[in-house]
Image: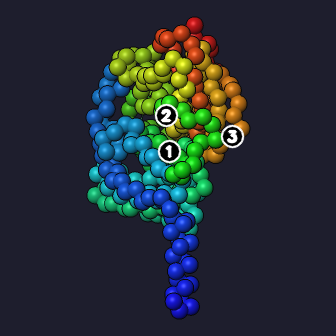
Amino acid sequence: MGIINKFSFIFLVIFLALSANAEVQRHRFVIQATKVKRLCKTHNTITVNGMFPGPTLEIKNGDTLEVQVVNKARYNVTIHWHGVRQMRTGWADGPEFVTQCPIRPGGSYTYRFTVQGQEGTLWWHAHSSWLRATVYGALIIRPREGKSYPFPKPKRETPILLGEWWDTNPIDVVREATRTEAAPNVSDAYTINAQPGDLYKCSSKETTIVPIDSGETNLLRVINVALNQPLFFKVANHKLTVVGADASYTKPFTTSVLMLGPGQSTDVLIRGDQPPSRYYMVTSVVLPIKIK
Ligand SMILES: *[C@@H]1O[C@H](CO)[C@@H](O)[C@H](O)[C@H]1NC(C)=O
Ligand SMILES: *[C@@H]1O[C@H](CO)[C@@H](O)[C@H](O)[C@H]1NC(C)=O
């Protein structure tokens, strides 16, 4: 083996060791108007792939995402990967007119980036006008193959997206606010996984239910996807153990209520240690009271 070959052989070994088990995940996001019924009325809501909330992306630390965004809506759009450290891929970050021109109706654009050195919960959302009111989803980053969480493995994991719903087109709300220079109209409901829940009118079917078996410990990946609103989160009669925030692990601590600013995420463990029953899960702008 000559010197050049020896070098390239060593290089190849190092490369293979570094990229062990790292995958390239390919997805297609079709931005499109979809009929969505909330608060008694049906709207033509802009979604990804007709899903609301949009698809959850689940990757491992070190994986590469390749997402082709096809714009079939009547608005310009871009997608931002909220919280992802874009190492040498700044152009994949997504804010319109900052790192790219918007994707026009009928156009498409492929984002490609590697998530490295981050584990936990992040999310993605539209970064054009107020499309992010409905164009959003969770981005879950698990440990590399062979590695585990720095806390006992939860039985189940559930993303919990705290959001807002306008009983009108959110694009009209921001356009009106810009035109009149007044504060934008406030939202008509706070939502969990895009559902207002049965305390709002006509919403008994639009309610998110998260099952927990007796004695089991589950992980809730709570994300504030609201436009501008800090939100509280609580589960009646249950304690929450915080184990991560914004894709970093934390020293675990126990609390009964979370407060998240818009864009932030908090991972919590919850144990089915109460008598089997239905317990309210609440998000609100004021500190929720204990529901008996
Ligand atoms: C839509 O995007 C195109 C090109 O990406 C840009 O030239 C145009 O100004 C955008 N329109 C609006 C309303 O932002
Ligand atoms: C904002 O709220 C005002 C007062 O309720 C209402 O008249 C107006 O139509 C709302 N704007 C939009 C875009 O829904």
Asked whether the viewer can see residue 38, the reply is: yes
| Res 176 quadrant in image | top left
Contact flag, marks 1 and 3 (Cβ < 8 Å): no
In the picture, the disc for residue 157 is 2
**In this rendering, position of residue 110 left or right of residue 124:** left
Front in this rendered view, residue 70 or 211: 211
Q: Mark 3 packing: few (<14 Cα in 10 Å), some, or many (20+)?
A: some
Question: Residue 89 appears at what percent x and percent y?
Answer: 52, 65
Q: Residue at x 58, y 64 (%)?
A: 87
* Residue topped by disc 3: 250
Q: Looking at the picture, tell me which residue is in the foreground, 182 or 106.
A: 106
Residue drawn at x 60%, y 14% is: 237
Q: SS for tag 2?
A: strand
- Neighbours of disc 1 within 10 Å: few (<14), some (14-19), many (20+): some
The answer to whether mark 1 and mark 2 are in CB contact below 8 A is: yes
- For label 1, the SS is strand
User: Residue flagged by tag 1: what amino acid is it?
Assistant: Ile
Residue type, mark 3 in image: Thr
Please state, as top left, top right, bottom left or bottom right, where the C terminus lies in the image: top right
Image quarter for residue 76? bottom left
Residue at mark 1: 140
For image coordinates 33% across by 60% down, the residue present is 108
Which residue is at 60% across, 32% downward? 268
50 is higher (above) or lower (below) than 40 = below
